[in-house]
Image (spheres, grey):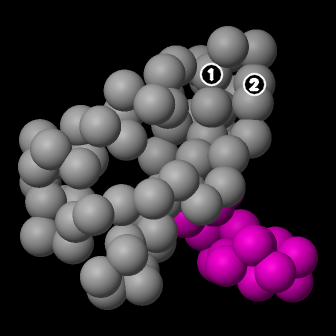
């Protein structure tokens, strides 16, 4: 399974959108400082995720989250 996920910075209250086959390990990478963008905004907490059967579906959903339509979708549903 593959996942599109949203993390929230517990210090800056900003969001990070990503996709992975292992959300738990990916969250550990973010909190360990191994991801450049998230390094300065640690610690991170898993805020939301969706599950997909293929990597391409998860990446497509991640890109949607990063778009203005995705932002409006997440806002309208109270996710962010």
Whether residue 6 appears in magenta in the rendering, the answer is no
Which quarter of the picture shows residue 68? bottom right
On residue 38, which mark appears?
A: none
Residue 7 in view here: yes
Relative to residue 41, is residue 79 drawn left or right?
A: right
Q: Position of residue 40 (x, y in %)?
A: 12, 70
Number of other residues with Cα within 10 Å of mark 1, as a class: few under 14, some 14 to 19, many 20 or more: some
Please report whichever mark, 1 or 2, sits nearer to the chain's N-terminal start: 1
Q: Is residue 80 above or below residue 32?
A: below
Name the outermost residue toward the right.
77
Q: Determine whether 46 is above or below 77 in the image.
A: above
| Residue name at image x 49 percent, y 32 percent | 23
Query: Dot 2 lies on which element?
Result: strand
In the image, residue 42 lies at what x, y percent? 22, 66
| Residue topped by disc 1 | 2
Report which residue position mark 2 lands on.
52
Residue 9: quadrant of the picture? bottom left
CB of mark 1 within 8 Å of CB of mark 2?
yes
- The quadrant in which the C terminus is found is bottom right
Quadrant where the N terminus is found in the figure:
top right
Which residues fall within the magenta stretch? Answer: 62-80
Point 61% across, 41% down: residue: 4
Secondary structure of the magenta portion, mostly? helix
Residue sitting at x 37%, y 75%: 10
């Amino acid at each position: 399974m593959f996942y599109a996920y949203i993390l929230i910075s517990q210090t800056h209250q900003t969001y990070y959108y990503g996709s992975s086959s292992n959300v738990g390990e990916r969250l550990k990478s973010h909190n360990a400082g191994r991801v450049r963008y998230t390094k300065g905004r640690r610690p991170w907490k898993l805020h939301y995720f969706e599950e997909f059967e293929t990597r391409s579906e998860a990446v497509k959903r991640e890109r949607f989250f990063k778009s203005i339509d995705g932002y409006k979708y997440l806002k309208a549903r109270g996710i962010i």
